[in-house]
Amino acid sequence: MTYRTILTLALVGLLAGSASAQAERPGSTIPPALEALAAKVVELAVKARVDNGVSQTGRLDYLARAARGHAQEMLDLNYFSHTSPTPGHERPKQRIELAGGWDLGMAENIYRSNGIPADEVAQAVVDAWLKSPTHRHNLLNPKYNRMDVGIALTGEDSYAIVQMFAFQAVSIESLSASPSGSGYKITFKGKVVDGPSNKGAIVIGNSIGTKFEADSSGMFEVSFDAPADAMIAVGLQKPDGRYAIDLEFPASFAANH
């Protein structure tokens, strides 16, 4: 059988200090076969990292949601690109934000196949990414510690596959906000996942605000005031005393979370 595959990639938003396309439809269900195929692609991608001496990655729901939404939209609108024609969803970073993720270091691989049997697709896509220098760079990049995959199917043996990566330094465990003056009083519970230390600070604009120190499990909780239009950054303290910013979200996200 002759197989026809198309693939492309762009490295989006550079790492650590760099700062999804349609979000998955609310209430949508994932066909078990596609969920299993996505899990297999993740498994083989992680194996490729380990085989090449790179650390394993964990999965993130919002990466999977953003990836599935973009894969489905590419099929629905008949295009193949990292750039969506849907206003507000054009870039991978926007799609991840719509899915609930605010990590600054991220990247995306995309793949389209026709005619590859379902039981061969996962290996085919990972092999193709490994043979492409730019795809391989993303797949084996040691900076990324999170990765997930979304897949859409049209017809028989015709797939759009999207793989999304992120560097997650701090996870958002819970957020709440109440009106305070012209802004919000925000309570943020987070977890230090990866970074230079367990000490950090909330940064609003150019001002270092409330500081925190995570416990032995990485958990911390802070409360602070923020203007309604503020972007809230979470920084982890480096050995030189400065802060590495890898998570940033708008105050409005906390208010609507």
Image (tube, helix red, strand yellow):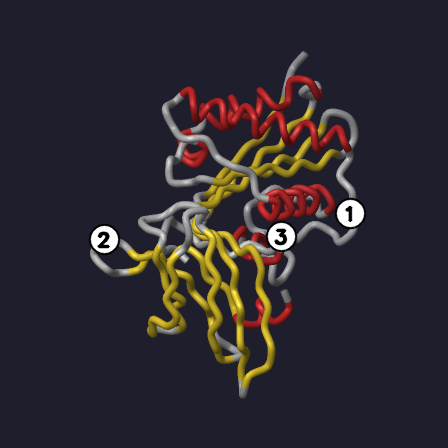
* Residue at left offset 41%, top offset 55%: 214
Q: Is residue 66 left or right of residue 156?
A: left
Q: Secondary structure at mark 1?
A: loop
Q: In the rendering, which numbered label is found on residue 28?
A: 1
Residue 239's disc number = 2
Which of the two discs, 3 and 1, sits closer to the camera? 1
Q: Which mark identifies residue 21?
A: 3
Of residue 214 and residue 95, the one placed in the foreground of this image is 214
The amino acid at mark 3 is Ala
Circle 2 SS class? loop
Q: Is residue 117 above or below residue 223?
A: above
Q: Are marks 3 and 1 in contact (CB under 8 Å)?
A: no
| Kind of residue at disc 1 | Ser
The quadrant of the rendering that contains the N terminus is: top right
Q: Which circle marks residue 63 in the picture?
A: none
Q: Residue at x 78, y 51 (%)?
A: 27
For this view, does 255 lie left or right of residue 16?
A: right
Marks 1 and 2, Cα distance to the nearest angstrom? 45 Å
Mark 3, Cα crowd under 10 Å, few <14 / some 14-19 / many 20+, is many
Work out whether mark 2 precedes mark 3 in sequence or the reverse, and give the earlier one: 3
Q: Amino acid at mark 2?
A: Pro
